[in-house]
Amino acid sequence: MEILDWIFVVGYFAFIAVIGYQTSKRIRTVKDYNVAGEKVTISILFASLAASVLGGGASTGMAGNVYKDGYVFMFAFCAYGIASVLIGYFIAPRLKAYKGAQTVGDIMERHYGKKAKLVTGILSVGLCTGIIGGQALALGTMLKVILDIPPLVGILIGMGAVILYTSFGGVMAVIQTDVLQFVLLGVILPLSLIIGLFAVGGTDTLIAKVPDFHFTLLGNWEITTFIGLFVTFLLGEALIPPYTQRIFSSKDPETARKGYIIAGFFSFGFFFITASLGLVAYVLFPGIQTDNALPTIVKELLPVGVTGLAVAALLAVIMSTASSFLNSTTVSFMRDIYPFLSRKKTSDKQELLLGRILTVIVGIASLIFALNVPSIIAALEYSYYLWAPTVVFPLVMGIMWNFRNATVGLSSIVVGAIITLIWTFALHEPFGLSGVVPGFIANIITFFIAHSLTKNNDAGSSAIKVDKEMLENDVV
């Protein structure tokens, strides 16, 4: 890269450091740190959600997998956008109605008891740590290909910056940097595709030089493989801690609804752009490693100045996701797990200090995970195994139909996790079907069996309308 490119990249890192420092001076309470004082508007919520969703998996991972398998991967990945729209329409406004809630564990406690809160907290921390690891791996890949920095050094630089501004500024800093990152990616990635298509010789030339199966719905995949991955992406990030945290941060239910829906629809366009960049790389750079597809385009095709902005944009979108999950890990631990480890009451000042220390610890743990998985998408898939077959269904049933039974919630979580682990690691995913699918089915079946056996012990009815008293009282 030229001097001008380096100025843009270094300037970006300096700017986010300033944001973290300035935001830290405005943090007065744990509520400010965890949910930004519940003051986030629609435009900010949309930009933050969009930037968080479109991380290493949706950028570097998307381009690399489409390079290898074609648009079939994009079609499976669109499950993310579908989930966002559905959650925005049906669930987000109801979640915002839970008074004082800041984590998924808070919601699970009000429907399934304190043990469910603890288990959900543990799963939340595991999920988020794994996904942070995926983003760290994407950072290392990006910096290695573009700047020729060793992957470990690149991971340390990128994640060091994330840990710095996240630990100081909490979710307020995360959301502010999200907006900057959203603007960068919204300009640079479409521009990169235009330049890439010009280098290829136009759309017709691209289509002629790419195998036909790259443009079909299933490509060379088996239908079971597609269904498994689609379900994994549909449920894997459904109502996960960072996105529910955005709902809790919004100023009212309508803001939560619109922000989620708009972000979901926006994601489809973004997925198409990054997927198409993968096909451009297939034509221009045959034989490269799949995860290097997008970084190689940035390094080899873009002009001086634009390259620096593109590097900043790609780093931004990955770091945005990493910071969101890092902050959520800290919040989940402090609210869902820490009270079970220590009965001592802590002041806001003490809790803020503990949260910042924990942010650093989680960041280090995610680095260790990143160095022990084969690819970015593998890191994400392993993480989703902790969430979709365990928490999603009982959480939705509680929110939408007011189920309140500790036995039902815990049993469905445990059985879903066991079946997923057996299918994935003991049976090695027969028929190419992701372990998330049988785990999720087992989770649902167990939920209803346990409900039928213990329904006389339910703490509430299954009425659709959630009343205010239920929202404010825990299950005992």
Image: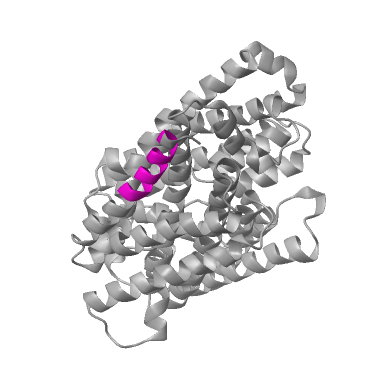
Give the vertical position of 419 relative to 38 (above or below): below
Q: Residue 172, how many percent across, how many down?
A: 28, 55
Q: In this rendered view, identify the residue nearer to me: 125 or 248.
A: 125
Q: Residue 177, how many percent across, how many down?
A: 33, 47
Q: Residue at x 73, y 15 (%)?
A: 208
**Residue 402 can be seen, yes or no:** no
Is 132 on the left or on the right of 360, as rendered? right
Q: Does the magenta stretch include residue 214?
A: no
Is 196 on the left or on the right of 90, as rendered? right
Is 134 on the left or on the right of 67, as rendered? left
Q: Does the magenta stretch include residue 6?
A: yes
Q: Which residue lies furthest to the front in this view?
A: 3
Give the extent of the magenta segment.
4-15
Q: Which residue is drawn at 49% across and 51% down?
A: 238
The quadrant in which residue 131 appears is: bottom right
**Residue 169 can be seen, yes or no:** yes
Its colouring scheme is one colour
Give the vertical position of 64 relative to 38 (above or below): above
Determine the main secondary structure of the stretch shown in magenta. helix
Q: Quadrant of the C terminus?
A: bottom left
